[in-house]
Amino acid sequence: MRVVFVHGACVRDGAWWWHRTAEMLQERGVASVAPGLPSCGEAGEPAGVGGPGLREDVQAVRRALLAADEPAVVVAHSYGGIVAAEAAAGVASVRHLLLVSSYLPEAGQSLSDFADGPAPFLDVDPGAGTFGVRQELLIETFLHDCDREAQEQSRHHLARQSAQVTSQPVGAAAWQQVQSTYVVCAQDRGTPATSQREFARRAGSVVELDTGHHPFLSQPAAMAGLVLGV
């Protein structure tokens, strides 16, 4: 088994966000990869107007899934659930979707269908066509239950993202084809648990962790256990 981790919005370097859980999995012989998302500027092309969007993100994750034939678990975090919905569809090696504080869109739905406009912790630049996390709200919103080291390092792994990803619809819904587990992060201040529980109605099963938005940083052992258990 291997794991493909799909990071959320407005960050880069998925391997860093995932590294604490990845190290525990590696100790158990489970390898993982964290493909970069072009809409976050991770393919060398700047994010923004005319830049890469959801389609390019889907292609990047799909390439990672098709790179090996062994059974794969896709761990999709937050916006990553939008990407994984299409990227994992029809890929025979994908055996489970683990959706962490995430979204399960139907074909034709976009990220904007799950929200009533930009969240207060986001900084949107319409002229540049990008959005990002407000630095002053990063810790209290997303990392309040993480240790100081993770909080400080996280600031170096943020990204401006192409705003077009919020309105671009997915072309498939992998969670309708593959077993899925939704991980509700009960202390999440970015995506409230009440909203997560509503999103989770579409998943095959639901578990809750008493964590903030990034349990793979704050409680990596719990996350590794979930991955190994699916």
Image: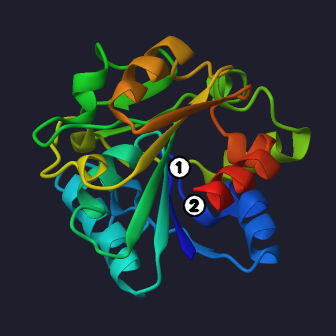
Q: State the residue at coordinates (63%, 23%).
A: 188
Distance of label 2 from label 1 (alpha carbons): 8 Å
**Looking at the rendered structure, which numbered label has been put on residue 176?**
none
Rendering colour mode:
rainbow
For residue 28, side relative to residue 112 (left or right): right
Q: Position of residue 141 (x, y in %)?
A: 64, 22
Q: Is residue 72 above or below residue 159?
A: below
Q: Position of residue 25 (x, y in %)?
A: 74, 68
**Looking at the rendered structure, which numbered label has been put on residue 14?**
2
Q: Position of residue 183 (x, y in %)?
A: 56, 36
**Looking at the rendered structure, which numbered label has been put on residue 11?**
1
Q: Residue furthest bottom?
A: 68
Evaluate whether residue 101 shows in this view. Answer: no
Quadrant location of the C terminus in the rendered image: bottom right
Evaluate whether residue 98 shows in this view. Answer: yes
Q: Nearer the viewer, mark 2 or mark 1?
A: 2
